[in-house]
Image (tube, helix red, strand yellow):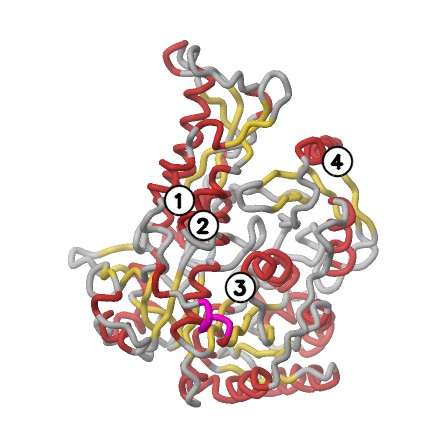
């Protein structure tokens, strides 16, 4: 059996100009980055066409550590919809080097349902992450320079500065650091740390901005900390927004690539769903809806994370909403939530599979909380048995949920024809029924508790002392009307990774609440979540290699 990267190496890529033509674009409309990648200028977006387009969201049940193949299904579904005559573009996030070198080893789909050029997309791509990182760290440098300065000082209180540095790599040793050591010429010593670039507020801002002007406005609103007299200090007080936006002048443009079957695909931004909003940019989604009839997009991890944030943050900000939600389910994830250890998930175990159904049932319920129609896509793995697939289908029918087996890894779009038909039928009957989960005028505590109780199934929310201080700070600055972006483990509906299935009668502990005024949301950090992940015991980086001819291996 060929690996993902071997399949990608065998594919014949079309020139990016040919892909652009499929969207009705001329070579002059795009900005090529080599032969197979291009930037799409924002002037191509047509708001009237955006409103007419149909948006399809792909989410999932609570995943196993390697994931359940949302990206693979998203790509395969877009191929399947194109097969049945629906002009469709898949619009996805860009990969972060953290997961590429950590657990997953890549994020461009898999098998015959992936994006190309696979290696370029997974490794640096068009430099968007680097631009976001530099823009973020420029603000950090201006903050420390202002503390050092005697003539133009804002009298910042170093103890209150919440803005950290970022880098696009998993490095747990950088979570807490002390900067400014080495004497007066090396800055003022203070404790700070690093987040991963995917968790940067600049990343969140880029993915929620309407255009360059809105980007700059949002950057100016970034909360930095307090002055010694207790006044809030923002990026605009440091005159940072202009230079920060200048670094993002190309990164704000979505990227055009292609699928294995030569259909257009757009990638842009890359916030994680467990520590950020977890979906691609508003700009990229509008671009896709301008240039095609249907757009398939995804929200990271389970619906309790990326899906909820898509509805309560992305939809509020963009004015867009999905016609349906495709919930990716796998036999192995059901067995995992039924108590089977990861190393035994390829073995048939119907009892465990049935025990794990409670997680799928809860995620179906979560989709319906937003008055949306779920469709279950069973992402088929080579080790799945027909009996396992049949049992899942029977359970979905008992829940009154449409279901289809998606064999997209081995068959590409052909393996998604049944799923595409179900989606097409549902989209044809789409009505604007979406409603957010909470009212922005509710208190911060109320909004957090609605998410924790209704989406996660918690019985209560406990606020650690630091979180209680943050609630007072949020009230002092006047930010209680912002939406909520929960930082929570992706491994469980609860905030405790070991509670699998559908846990009940548990408390969610909010450790602290970060303020993201530029992005326009608050980030309650629950349990032991870290915004700078660490590498696993055996990282994917140990498998990745390149030969003397420049051929890369080990990505999957």
Across and down, in percent, residue 490 comes to 61, 56
Residue drawn at point x = 41 percent, y = 44 percent? 168
Across and down, in percent, residue 234 comes to 53, 31
Task: State the residue position of label 4.
Answer: 464
Tell me if 347 is positioned left or right of 510 in this view: left
- The span shown in magenta is 47-51
Across and down, in percent, residue 525 comes to 65, 43
Tell me if 526 is positioned left or right of 82 in this view: right
Residue 206's disc number: 2
Q: From the viewer's perspective, is the residue at label 3 or at label 4 nearer?
A: 4
Task: State the residue position of label 3.
Answer: 67
Q: Nearer the viewer, residue 406 or 262?
A: 262
Q: Secondary structure at mark 4?
A: loop
Task: Find out whether the residues at labels 3 and 4 contact each other: C-beta distance under 8 Å.
Answer: no
Q: Residues within 10 Å of mark 1 (few under 14, many from 20)?
A: many
Q: Is residue 453 above or below residue 2?
A: above
Q: Kindly give the residue lying farthest to the left in the view shown.
A: 549
Which secondary structure type mostly characterizes the magenta part of the structure? helix
Residue drawn at point x = 41 percent, y = 82 percent? 87
Q: Residues within 10 Å of mark 4 (few under 14, many from 20)?
A: some
Task: Find out whether the residues at labels 1 and 2 contact each other: C-beta distance under 8 Å.
Answer: yes
- Distance from disc 4 to disc 1, alpha carbons, whole Å, reads 32 Å
Number of numbered callouts drawn: 4
Residue drawn at point x = 70 percent, y = 51 percent? 440
| Residue 536 in sight from this viewpoint | no
């Amino acid at each position: 059996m060929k690996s993902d990267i071997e399949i990608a190496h065998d594919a014949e890529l079309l020139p990016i100009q040919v892909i652009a033509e499929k969207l009705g674009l001329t070579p002059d409309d795009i900005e090529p980055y080599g032969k197979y990648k291009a930037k799409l200028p924002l002037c191509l977006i047509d708001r009237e066409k955006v409103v007419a387009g149909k948006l399809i969201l792909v989410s999932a049940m609570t995943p196993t550590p390697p994931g359940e193949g949302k990206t693979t299904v998203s790509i395969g579904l877009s191929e399947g919809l194109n097969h049945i005559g629906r002009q469709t573009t898949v619009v996805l996030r860009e990969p972060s080097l953290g997961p590429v070198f950590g657990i997953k080893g890549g994020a461009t789909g898999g098998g015959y349902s992936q994006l190309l050029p696979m290696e370029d997309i997974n490794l640096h791509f068009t430099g968007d992450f680097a631009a976001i990182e530099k823009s973020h760290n420029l603000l950090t440098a201006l903050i420390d320079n202002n503390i050092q300065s005697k003539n133009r000082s804002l009298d910042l209180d170093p103890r209150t500065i919440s803005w950290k540095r970022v880098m696009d790599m998993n490095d747990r040793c950088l979570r807490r650091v002390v900067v400014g050591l080495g004497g007066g010429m090396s800055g003022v010593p203070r404790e700070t740390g690093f987040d991963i670039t995917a968790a940067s507020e600049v990343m969140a801002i880029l993915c929620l901005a309407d255009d360059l002007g809105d980007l700059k406005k949002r950057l100016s609103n970034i909360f930095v900390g307090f002055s010694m007299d207790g006044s809030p200090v923002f990026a605009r007080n440091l005159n940072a927004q202009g230079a920060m936006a200048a670094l993002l002048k190309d990164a704000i443009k979505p990227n055009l690539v292609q699928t294995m079957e030569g259909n257009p695909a757009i990638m842009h931004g890359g916030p994680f769903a467990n520590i950020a909003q977890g979906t691609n940019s508003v700009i990229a989604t509008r671009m896709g809806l301008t240039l095609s009839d249907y757009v398939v997009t995804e929200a990271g991890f389970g619906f309790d994370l990326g899906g909820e944030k898509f509805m309560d943050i992305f939809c509020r900000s963009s004015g867009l909403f999905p016609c349906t939600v495709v919930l990716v389910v796998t036999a192995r994830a059901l067995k995992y939530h039924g108590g089977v250890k990861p190393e035994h998930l390829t073995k048939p175990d119907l009892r465990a599979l049935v025990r794990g159904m409670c997680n799928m049932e809860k995620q179906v319920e979560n989709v319906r909380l937003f008055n949306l129609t779920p469709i279950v896509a069973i992402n088929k793995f080579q080790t799945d048995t027909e009996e396992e697939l049949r049992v899942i289908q029977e359970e979905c029918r008992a829940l009154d949920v449409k279901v289809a087996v998606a064999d997209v890894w081995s068959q590409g779009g052909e393996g998604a024809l049944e799923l595409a038909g179900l989606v097409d039928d549902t989209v044809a009957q789409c009505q604007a029924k979406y409603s957010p989960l909470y009212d922005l005028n509710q208190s911060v505590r109320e909004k957090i508790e609605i998410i924790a109780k209704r989406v996660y199934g918690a019985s209560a929310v406990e606020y650690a002392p630091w979180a209680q201080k943050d609630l007072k700070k949020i009230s002092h600055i006047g930010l209680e009307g912002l939406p909520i972006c929960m930082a929570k483990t992706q491994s469980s509906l609860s905030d405790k990774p070991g509670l699998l299935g559908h846990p009940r009668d548990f408390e969610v502990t909010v450790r602290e609440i970060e303020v993201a005024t530029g992005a326009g949301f608050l980030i309650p950090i629950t349990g032991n979540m870290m915004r700078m992940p660490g590498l696993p015991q055996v990282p994917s980086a140990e498998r990745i290699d390149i030969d003397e001819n420049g051929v890369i291996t080990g990505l999957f």
